[in-house]
Image (tube, rainbow, N blue to C red):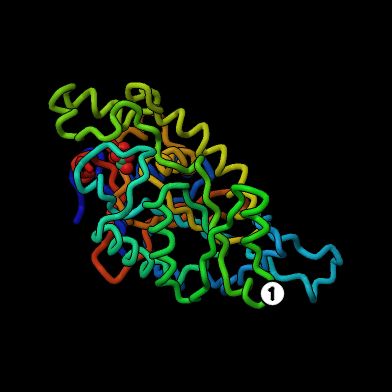
Amino acid sequence: MAAATSHSAIVHTQSHRWSARNSRFEKQTSNLNLVSAGNMYPIRQQFGFGFVCASSLQGSSVVEPVQLPSNGNSDHTPKKSSESSLILIRHGESLWNEKNLFTGCVDVPLTPKGVEEAIEAGKRICSIPIDVIFTSSLIRAQMTAMLAMMQHRRKKVPIIVHNESEQAHLWSQVYSEETRKQSIPVITAWQLNERMYGELQGLNKQETADRFGNEQVHKWRRSYDIPPPNGESLEMCAERAVAYFKEHVVPQLTAGKHVMIAAHGNSLRSIIMQLDKLTSQEVISLELSTGIPMLYIFKEGKFIRRGSPVGPSEASVYAYTRKLAQYR
Ligand SMILES: O=C(O)[C@H](O)COP(=O)(O)O
């Protein structure tokens, strides 16, 4: 499937070359030290890295980047991966996506279809190493993370790290080194929540478009710096989401840890805008489908976009065109 629009959808298949727009995208980004995928190769062929077993949590409930032993004895220093994988995934369909309601920071669960999407996403990433998971404080993202991890080949147990109080931290300790090695910390952060949609939350998207006009609603939904009434613009969402990403996720990647972030359409758009160095104009046409994983490789401080891991089903779409993104 190749889109013919000026904002072409970039269809990720194993051998599909990027669309015309993306070759321009490639040219634009190549001088930004970003290498976008050429042909998509099976992930395993691409990277020889073995699984980096998550190091133990050392009893701390806040996951610090792994500290390599300072003894300098190379025999015992675990080999740090020269590259780390970063998986981004928007939650599966939620009950309010299904009803076409603006959701924002209202905490609604997944639909059965959204559960299926999360499971399908897990199958697509089941061979990619994951050492730590970040998600938002909203249940639809947390459900997506947990359901996806149930499909992972390593069968490690994702454990939500509780830090809401000293007691929560103390009472959620794991006292077995062996058990810790078989688990993956899941860090929840409100900074990764969906952008707050203000007075649109709970309103039907199509009815709102009928009332205020498609143009105005599209500006509220997709522009960079125009907030919905008493809500957050993408720029305001980026101020918390990108700041959190830089402060908490990048150090993990730098330490060679493989990361998955399960979050939301707009909090992820703000992060992808940063990774892909999209302008405030380009980000307007960036749409994320529910439950489609996106893989980046972090290497020498740079993010290389690898597209969507090929799953058992048809090619996935990382939409760069409005019509591909339903009013959901
Ligand atoms: O918050 C919502 O309504 C959706 O998760 C994202 O909405 P949008 O696609 O209108 O930004």
Q: For residue 73, what is the image quadrant? A: bottom right
Residue 186: where, in percent of width, then height? 53, 58
| Residue that extends furthest to the right in the rendered view of this protein | 71
Q: How many marks?
A: 1
Return the residue nearer the eye: 214 or 300: 214
In this rendering, does residue 14 appear at all?
A: no
Q: Is residue 125 visible?
A: yes
Task: Locate the C terminus by quadrant.
Answer: top left
Q: Residue at x 45, y 52 (%)?
A: 305
Question: The N terminus appears in which quarter of the rendering?
Answer: bottom left
Task: Kindly identify which residue carries mark 1.
Answer: 177
- Residue 203 lies, with reference to residue 119, above or below; the image says above
240 sits left or right of 180 in the view: left
Badge 1 residue CB within 8 Å of ligand 1: no
Q: Nearer the viewer, residue 37 or 227?
A: 227
The secondary element bearing badge 1 is classed as: helix
Binning the other alpha carbons within 10 Å of mark 1 as few (below 14), some (14 to 19) or many (20 upward) gives few
Q: Amino acid at mark 1?
A: Glu
Q: Where is residue 177 drawn, in percent x and y?
A: 69, 74
Residue 122 drawn at (x, y percent):
38, 66
Determine whether, in the image, residue 167 is placed left or right of residue 270. Answer: right
Which residue is more in the foreground, 96 or 73?
96
Furthest residue toward left: 210
Residue 34, compared with residue 12, is above or below; it is: above
Q: Residue at 25% across / 61% down in the picture?
A: 112
On the image, the x and y values in percent for residue 254 come to 64, 54
Taking the image as shown, residue 151 lies to the left or right of residue 222, namely right
Q: Quadrant of ligand 1?
A: top left
Q: For the point 39% across and 58% down, which residue is it?
A: 143
Left or right of 157, for residue 306: left
